Amino acid sequence: MKASDYIVSFLSERGVNVVFGYIGGMITHLVDSLAKSGNVRYIQTYHEQTAAIAAEGYALESGKFGVAICTSGPGATNMMTGIADAYFGSIPVLFITGQVNTYEYKYNKPIRQQGFQETDVVSIVRPITKYAVMIDDADNLRYELEKAVHIATTGRKGPVVIDLPMDISRAEINTSTLKSYIPEKEKLDSYDLSDVVSIINSASKPMLLLGGGCQSEKSKELLASFIKQTNIPVVTSLMGRGATNETYTNYIGMIGSYGNRCANMAIAEADLLLALGTRLDTRQTGAMVEEFLPKAKIIHVDIDKNELEHHRLTNRIKINSSLEEFLYNLMQHHISPTVNSEWTQRIQLLKSRYNQENEVKRFVQNKAPYTFFLALNNITKENDIITVDIGQNQMWAAQMVKLKKGQKFITSGGLAPMGFSLPVAIGMAFASPDKTIYAITGDGGLHMSIQSLLLISQYNLNIKTIVLNNNALGMITQFQSLYFEGRMKGTTAQSGFINPDYEGIAKAYGLNYVARNEKSLGTIMKDMDVHNLFYEYQIDGLTTVSPKLEYNRPINQPSPQIDENE
């Protein structure tokens, strides 16, 4: 059996039915094996970064691991943004990079390069993968594939890279003699729940913080039961959006540097924070870490021991556990925190006074972006998917989108590469072709991934592309206004950043173009019924995100500032 045929059968046996990639010389045998397969579909993307991020989307939606492939040299280096994003986003993806023949590879020779497009991929990607290996012996193929997939899909999930020389991919192998990988059972720290139960039950102002580690279906199921049982108020991080039913009465909102004011104010008043599946990074706590709940207890649950041990917050009880195991074990105990009526009333008061709608009315001059999301909330349905890019579009969406039952909110909060929204939507569309996906991007992010548009019309994907076009790199113009006396460079049409004719772009990529602005937004329900939609929402003037936590301010005092007595 040819090695490349074996790889495809390996993927098929594990339920993977789509592989994303960009063909090149060193990966042709694997693409040919995919072409012959009746079970695994090969999607030729128009950039390796698109393939990598689409594989992330497939993993996020399917619950399996994603797969992306590319050729050697520039193919592999183009893919590295997606590899890094999967690493920081804890997304299980198998990346297979083509490599020159083993007899052309330089190994330890003190030269820069021996083979054409040869690059030491493994050394480059090692800091941004859970595991990376070059297979230079075909007899190790089964072992390394099994090992890589096991590592990608267990513990804190993440990407793995197999660098595959061309002569190995075309080698004939005896599958009956290939050795298999036998994993060692991962050991997590033991912990005693009795103290945790006591702390939770004695809290009068408890709060749940849900992070990106809460997004598995099993975690959501357990969280729903726990919240129903305890009635504890809930906030989320950016990556935790959608981890719970946000129609829950005591759901407050998103915390963080661009979090909802009501959520940031509420978390500061809690006497207990149960932080689940979150790194508690400075985007959540603010740079003034010492001001983050200094008098409260924090129970910090994370599957990654390193995240627990290497953190500047000192007032934490550290639980090294998978979220599913922790919640299951916790619910075997009698959990009944003394959530008093004053606390729940306080939560409702903060929500009513400082929700995002009131924030916009009170502090935002250019309301057009927020007006769009208010309209979008009225037309999205249960189980829809909303993907957002990086920049102001991301934070407008995160602050204003009201998630309904079963909806997913997908963005990148670690590496945060512009150009994320469209490729991740494409991967999710191949995993769930019947779901409606709203792929929201800014005009800046669209520049980074514009070639992805062709896949939508080519495969008739159920994706509605929405471009919030303010003719600027809005997140940076907001920085330039705050910190550089309003000097704009490289961020506006006057300072070097311009956009193409989007109507012409849509036509070129076979999409149906619709342009609207704040005044013509009333037709959005009819507009969104258009298939293969490219929707340009035109925004005039400079834009801002509000609230925004400025440097050296505590989390509950974002800008614009409100009166201290208030």
Image (spheres, rainbow, N blue to C red):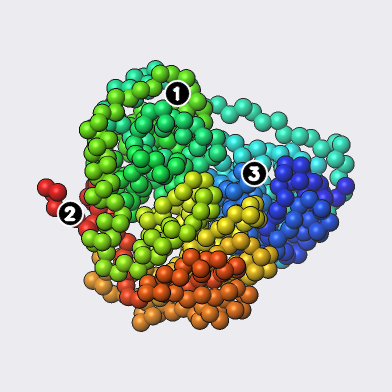
Which residue in the structure is indicated by mark 3? 64
Quarter assignment of residue 20: bottom right
Can you tell which of label 3 and label 2 is closer to the viewer?
Answer: 2
Q: Amino acid at mark 3?
A: Lys
Looking at the image, which residue sits at the far left?
565
| Circle 3/circle 2 CB separation < 8 Å | no
Between 87 and 325, the one nearer to me in the picture = 325
Residue 551: x, y in percent?
A: 26, 54
Between 444 and 315, the one nearer to me in the picture = 444
For the image, the number of numbered tags is: 3
**N-term-proximal mark, 1 vs 3:** 3
Task: Give me the disc on residue 562.
Answer: 2
Element type at marker 2?
Answer: loop
Which residue in the structure is indicated by mark 1? 330
At x 48% / y 23%, what residue is drawn?
329
At x 36% / y 79%, what residue is drawn?
495
At x 60% / y 54%, what residue is drawn?
435
Residue 422: x, y in percent?
A: 55, 62
| Circle 1/circle 3 CB separation < 8 Å | no
Task: Give me the disc on residue 511.
Answer: none
